[in-house]
């Protein structure tokens, strides 16, 4: 009875907070990517692809807030006083929190190891296809800013019998994050899968007031390299595209993939521990406002994120990296369990 009572309220509160947080995170992410979005038709698809990714941030916050707010409200109304003196009732409260934590952790693991990596891959492919379509549909004789860091000009354009678009007398201006600019002119070019192939041209590189020129017979431009941010081009970030099976197979011979595997395991563990910590906070605190609950859950989640980021900085030192990942998680688990089982004098 008590287990189902609290479990239903945890789920209801978590659903509301999750919806609000997910909408907030999606809106912020879409605003950041807005320069690449040139028509509203891809927004529904983009939102669907980003849902699993944003869930990794919204679910831990929503679930911990649901437990903290629900228990704190009952405690503030003195509805937990009688429960604290009934061992079976208090045990039922603990069971409801643990059961809710297990359900959320299972859901988080599905997103972290399978759905979110697929979301990363498909969203990146979506942006590349949009940029490629904009290249293929450019009007000859006009400079186009197809994506934020690329400007494109073609003098002529024709479609071959096999429906391949050939560009004649084309120019590219590529701007990179390190303030380097590349001016590329080629006699002809075409798209081959995920790359732009150019023939008979030259490249002018401009950086720090220095100019370098090179000629080429044939060169290849990786378009998606100018769509992704510099952080997404690192090997560690590329490993986020891998699902659990791929991570497990590659972890033994690739250090960055091994870190990504441990990182997701720890993130999944934090999903469980954050809910236990929320219960511990609620039992320790005499009065808790909604603002306090939001603040404490947000700060706790931020600390876990910073610890994982710190461990990533020491990825080359295996033992130190693993210590930074697992020691805070284990310490937080035993600390929360200790508070929860020694709650009688605190309720």
Image (cartoon, rainbow, N blue to C red):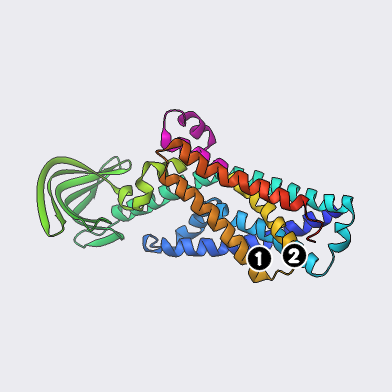
| Element at label 2 | helix
Give the extent of the magenta segment.
242-267
Does the rendering let one see residue 255? yes
Residue 288 occupies which quadrant of the picture? bottom right
Please check the rendered image and state whether residue 106 is part of the magenta-colored stretch, yes or no: no
The answer to whether 344 is drawn above or below residue 113 in the figure is below
Residue 48 visible in rendering: no
Q: Is residue 85 positioned above or below 166 on the image?
A: below
Q: Quadrant of the C terminus?
A: bottom right
Q: What is the x, y in percent for residue 100?
A: 73, 50
Identity of the residue drawn at 55% across and 52% down: 304
The residue singled out by tag 2 in the image is 72
x%, y% of residue 150? 26, 57
In front of the other: 85 or 101: 85
Between 341 and 299, the residue placed more toward the observer is 341
Asked whether the beta carbons under mark 2 and mark 1 sit within 8 Å of each other, the answer is: yes
| Residue neighbourhood size for the residue with mark 2, other residues' Cα within 10 Å, grouped as few (<14), some (14–19), many (≥20) | many
State the image quarter where residue 154 is shown: bottom left
- Name the residue that disc number 1 marks: 293
**Which of the pair 1/278 is nearer the observer?**
278
Q: Is 244 part of what is drawn in magenta?
A: yes
Ranked by sequence position, the earlier of labels 2 and 1 is 2
Query: With 201 as the anchor, is 67 left or right in this view?
Result: right
Picture residue at 46% right of the left edge, 28% below the top? 252
Residue at 84% from the left image edge and 68% from the top image edge: 78
Secondary structure beneath disc 1? Answer: helix
Residue drawn at (23%, 58%) of the image: 179
The local crowd at label 1, few if under 14, some if 14 to 19, many if 20 or more residues have their Cα within 10 Å, is many
Which numbered tag is attached to residue 318? Answer: none
By secondary structure, the bulk of the magenta-drawn segment is best described as helix
Q: Residue 3: image x %, image y %?
A: 83, 52
């Amino acid at each position: 009875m008590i287990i189902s009572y609290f479990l239903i309220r945890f789920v209801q509160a978590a659903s509301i907070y999750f919806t609000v947080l997910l909408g907030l995170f999606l809106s912020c992410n879409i605003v950041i990517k807005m320069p690449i979005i040139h028509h509203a038709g891809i927004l529904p698809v983009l939102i669907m692809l980003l849902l699993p990714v944003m869930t990794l941030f919204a679910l831990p916050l929503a679930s911990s807030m649901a437990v903290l707010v629900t228990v704190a409200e009952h405690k503030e109304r003195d509805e937990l006083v009688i429960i604290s003196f009934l061992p079976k009732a208090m045990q039922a409260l603990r069971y409801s929190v643990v059961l809710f934590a297990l359900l959320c952790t299972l859901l988080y693991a599905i997103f972290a190891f399978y759905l979110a990596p697929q979301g990363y891959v498909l969203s990146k492919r979506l942006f590349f296809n949009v940029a490629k379509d904009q290249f293929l549909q450019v009007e000859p004789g006009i400079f186009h800013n197809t994506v934020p860091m690329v400007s494109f000009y073609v003098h002529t354009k024709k479609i071959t019998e096999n429906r391949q678009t050939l560009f004649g007398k084309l120019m590219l201006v590529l701007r990179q994050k390190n303030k380097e600019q590349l001016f590329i002119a080629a006699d002809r070019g075409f798209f081959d899968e995920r790359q732009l192939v150019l023939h008979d041209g030259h490249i002018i590189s401009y950086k720090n007031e220095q100019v370098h020129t090179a000629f080429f017979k044939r060169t290849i431009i990786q378009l998606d390299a100018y769509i992704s941010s510099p952080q997404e081009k690192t090997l560690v970030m590329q490993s986020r595209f891998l699902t659990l099976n791929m991570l497990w197979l590659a972890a033994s011979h690739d250090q960055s993939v091994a870190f990504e595997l441990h990182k997701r395991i720890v993130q999944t563990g934090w999903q469980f521990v954050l809910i236990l910590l929320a219960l511990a906070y609620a039992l320790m605190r005499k009065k808790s406002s909604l603002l306090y609950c939001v603040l404490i859950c947000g700060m706790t989640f931020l600390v876990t994120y910073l610890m994982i980021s710190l461990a990533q900085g020491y990825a080359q030192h295996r033992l130190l990296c693993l210590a930074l990942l697992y020691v805070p998680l284990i310490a937080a688990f035993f600390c929360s369990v200790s508070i929860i089982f020694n709650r009688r004098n605190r309720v």
